[in-house]
């Protein structure tokens, strides 16, 4: 079964996979898997395989180290996440930097609520 962290990792890696696929004339294959990722849990496994074919050895969620017993807060400039709530991708907005796009749903990331960051 797919994990939200795996979806988040592929969301961030999709620009690289799209460039590699386009260079080999396989952009349509990636586009179809991305469309399937929006609803189909099996698409992540297929993206893993396709990534390996293009030389991406592994894509996985990053770990974050926190302080035990202390819930992380929301940064002053805001925390943004998946517009569909499908993955665990987090992004902290830096001053003057535009909000990035979700590469799966092709929409800007949305502001996360404070409740999202509490255990």
Image: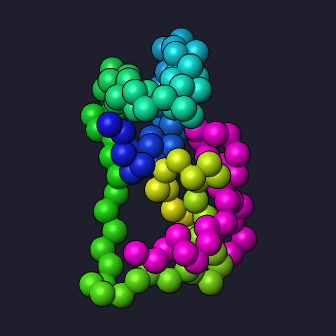
Residue 96 in which image quadrant: bottom right
State which region is magenta.
93-119
Residue 70 in which image quadrant: bottom left
Rendered residue at 49%/50% (across/down): 87
- What secondary structure predominates along the stretch shown in magenta? loop
Residue toward you, 16 or 12 = 12
Query: Does residue 107 belong to the magenta stretch?
Result: yes
| Most distant residue in the bottom direction | 70
Rendered residue at 27%/34% (across/down): 57
101 to the left or right of 18: right
**Depicted 70 relative to depicted 53: above or below:** below
Query: Does residue 23 belong to the magenta stretch?
Result: no
Relative image position of residue 109 (x, y in whole percent):
65, 55
- The answer to whether any part of residue 27 appears in the image is no
- The answer to whether any part of residue 36 appears in the image is yes
**Depicted 111 relative to depicted 100: above or below:** below
Relative image position of residue 13 (x, y in whole percent):
46, 41
Quarter of the image where the C terminus is located: bottom left
Relative image position of residue 114 (x, y in whole percent):
58, 77
**Depicted 38 relative to depicted 85: above or below:** above
> Which coloring applies here?
rainbow
Quarter of the image where the N terminus is located: top left
Relative image position of residue 53 (x, y in whole percent):
33, 20
Rendered residue at 44%/81% (across/down): 72
Q: How many marks?
A: 0
Rendered residue at 35%/52% (across/down): 61
């Amino acid at each position: 079964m797919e994990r939200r962290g795996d979806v988040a990792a592929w969301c961030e890696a999709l620009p690289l996979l799209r460039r590699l696929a386009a260079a080999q004339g396989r952009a349509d294959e990636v586009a179809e898997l991305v469309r399937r990722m929006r609803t189909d849990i099996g698409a992540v496994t297929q993206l893993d395989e396709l990534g390996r074919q293009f030389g991406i050895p592994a894509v996985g969620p990053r770990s974050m180290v926190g302080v035990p017993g202390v819930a992380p807060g929301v940064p002053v400039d805001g925390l943004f996440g998946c517009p569909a709530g499908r993955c665990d991708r987090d992004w902290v907005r830096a001053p003057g930097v535009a909000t990035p796009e979700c590469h799966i749903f092709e929409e800007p990331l949305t502001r996360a609520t404070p409740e999202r960051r509490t255990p």
